[in-house]
Image (spheres, helix red, strand yellow):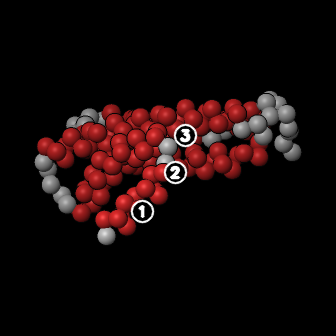
């Protein structure tokens, strides 16, 4: 039994680069917190620490994704990459409520999470029009009809 588990373990991690493994290990507490919060409602100090860690991890991930999406807009080379760009943007939009709920639970009596949430949504809608504007000025060497 242990031999079979070791075989499957090796096949999973043989093709996994080190950066993906580190990101997976860093995401484990976030996944644990979100699933734990769904099924068990306790107010322990560990729960508060996991909330702060989850909020920080998701904020850093979203900042990385926002930088990546702007870079993607400038390097996609053709307006035909617009579908992938919009799917990426919608994926970031689906993370907004998770970020808001975590921020609301950490900063209890502050209106900051609401303002951050609104600014994040506005920024995503501004980013939605970057490829169209770049296409209008001829950045992609194509013109739209």
Mark 1 is surrounded, within 10 Å at the Cα level, by few (under 14), some (14 to 19) or many (20 or more) other residues, namely few
- The numbered mark at residue 15 is 2
Q: In which quarter of the image is residue 46?
A: top left
Mark pair 2, 3: CA separation: 34 Å
Q: Residue at x 46, y 40 (%)?
A: 18
Q: Can residue 67 be seen in this view?
A: yes
Q: Quadrant of the N terminus?
A: bottom left
Location of mark 1 (residue): 8
Q: In which quarter of the image is residue 77?
A: top right
Q: In this view, does 120 lie to the left or right of 112?
A: right
First-in-chain label (2 vs 3):
2
Decide: is 115 above or below 98: above
Mark 1 near mark 2, Cβ–Cβ under 8 Å? no
The residue indicated by pointer 3 is 124
Whether residue 31 is situated above or below residue 48 in the rendered picture: below
Q: Earlier in the sequence, mark 1 or mark 2?
A: 1
Quadrant for the C terminus in the image: top right
Which secondary structure, mark 1? Answer: helix
54, 90: nearer the viewer: 54
Residue at point 37% right, 60% down?
A: 6
Tell me where residue 89 appears, x and y as whole percent.
Answer: 57, 45
Which residue: 78% across, 40% down?
78
User: Is tag 1's residue or tag 3's residue first in the polypeptide sequence?
Assistant: 1
Q: Residue furthest front?
A: 3
């Amino acid at each position: 039994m242990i031999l079979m588990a070791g075989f499957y373990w090796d096949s999973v991690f043989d093709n996994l680069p080190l950066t993906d493994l580190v990101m997976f290990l860093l995401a484990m507490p976030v996944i644990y917190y979100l699933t734990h919060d769904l099924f068990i409602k306790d107010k322990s100090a560990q729960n508060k620490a996991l909330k702060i860690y989850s909020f920080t991890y998701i904020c850093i991930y979203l900042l990385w994704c926002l930088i990546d999406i702007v870079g993607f807009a400038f390097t996609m080379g053709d307006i035909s990459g617009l579908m992938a760009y919009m799917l990426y943007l919608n994926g970031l939009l689906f993370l907004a409520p998770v970020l808001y709920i975590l921020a609301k639970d950490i900063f209890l009596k502050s209106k900051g999470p609401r303002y951050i949430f609104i600014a994040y949504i506005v920024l995503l809608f501004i980013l939605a029009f970057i490829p169209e504007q770049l296409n209008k000025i001829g950045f992609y060497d194509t013109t739209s009809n």
